[in-house]
Image: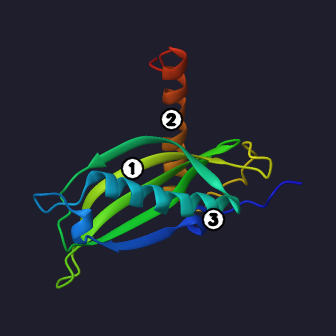
């Protein structure tokens, strides 16, 4: 029996953290590894919301740090499922810092991760379909499919250039 589809909106997740001293390095900025851990957790929640079961990180396909996050900063992570394949899916995460006085936010990092849906037997299992509701949903899905095709081609040694 196949599961009903879910929209990207159903997987939206927001996680808020504050950079405490144990998360900062000697120059007062957040450890990259801490931000990576927060990204993975936020993405996992989105993946599991879509699947309705455990999903595990298969790869971090892209991670770009754009601006520093400092000791005491409020950090907002937002994630959503961009596309689903047979047993895997792409999840996007953005990371912003917020000035609590002005509520102004600055994009500090973005990331794309691949998660795999895990069945009761511990093996990959099919993922419910993604119901694309908006033009933005369709554009994110198309981009994810192109990135996946490039990754698979690179793994097999083929070029996707025409």
Q: Name the residue under label 2.
A: 146
Residue 111 as seen in the image, left or right of residue 55: left
Label pair 1/3, CB-CB below 8 angstroms: no
Label pair 3/2, CB-CB below 8 angstroms: no
Element assignment for label 3 = helix
Between the C-alphas of marks 3 and 2, the distance is: 24 Å
Question: Quarter of the image holding residue 34?
Answer: bottom left
Q: How is the image coloured?
A: rainbow
Residue occupying image coordinates x 79% and y 52%: 120
10 Å neighbourhood of mark 1: few (<14), some, or many (≥20)?
many
Residue 159 in the image: x percent, y percent? 47, 16
Q: Nearer the viewer, mark 3 or mark 2?
A: 3
Residue 24 in the image: x percent, y percent? 21, 62
Residue 124 in the image: x percent, y percent? 72, 42
Q: Earlier in the sequence, mark 3 or mark 2?
A: 3
10 Å neighbourhood of mark 3: few (<14), some, or many (≥20)?
many
161 shown above or below 36: above
> Seen from this angle, which residue lies furthest right?
1
Residue occupying image coordinates x 48% and y 60%: 41
8 shown above or below 21: above
Residue 86 as seen in the image, left or right of residue 159: right
Q: Mark 3 points at which residue?
A: 49
Element assignment for label 2 = helix
User: What is the number of the mark on residue 111?
Assistant: 1
Residue 116 in the image: x percent, y percent? 63, 46
Q: Which of marks 1 and 3 is nearer the N terminus?
A: 3
User: What is the number of the mark on residue 59?
Assistant: none
10 Å neighbourhood of mark 2: few (<14), some, or many (≥20)?
few
Question: Quarter of the image holding residue 85?
Answer: top right
Residue occupying image coordinates x 59% and y 57%: 47
Residue occupying image coordinates x 56% and y 62%: 46
């Amino acid at each position: 029996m196949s599961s009903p589809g879910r929209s990207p909106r159903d997987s939206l997740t927001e996680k808020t953290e504050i950079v405490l001293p144990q998360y900062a390095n000697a120059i007062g900025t957040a450890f990259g590894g801490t931000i990576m851990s927060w990204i993975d957790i936020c993405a996992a929640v989105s993946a599991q919301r879509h699947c309705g079961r455990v999903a595990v990180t298969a790869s971090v396909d892209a991670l770009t740090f754009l601006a520093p996050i400092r000791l005491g900063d409020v950090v907002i992570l937002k994630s959503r499922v961009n596309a689903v394949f047979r047993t895997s899916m792409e999840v996007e995460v953005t990371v912003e810092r917020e000035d609590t006085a002005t509520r102004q936010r600055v994009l500090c990092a973005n990331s794309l991760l691949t998660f795999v849906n895990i069945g009761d037997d511990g093996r990959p299992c099919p993922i419910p379909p993604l119901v694309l509701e908006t033009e933005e949903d369709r554009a994110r899905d198309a981009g994810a499919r192109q990135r996946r095709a490039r990754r698979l081609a690179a793994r097999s040694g083929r070029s996707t250039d025409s």
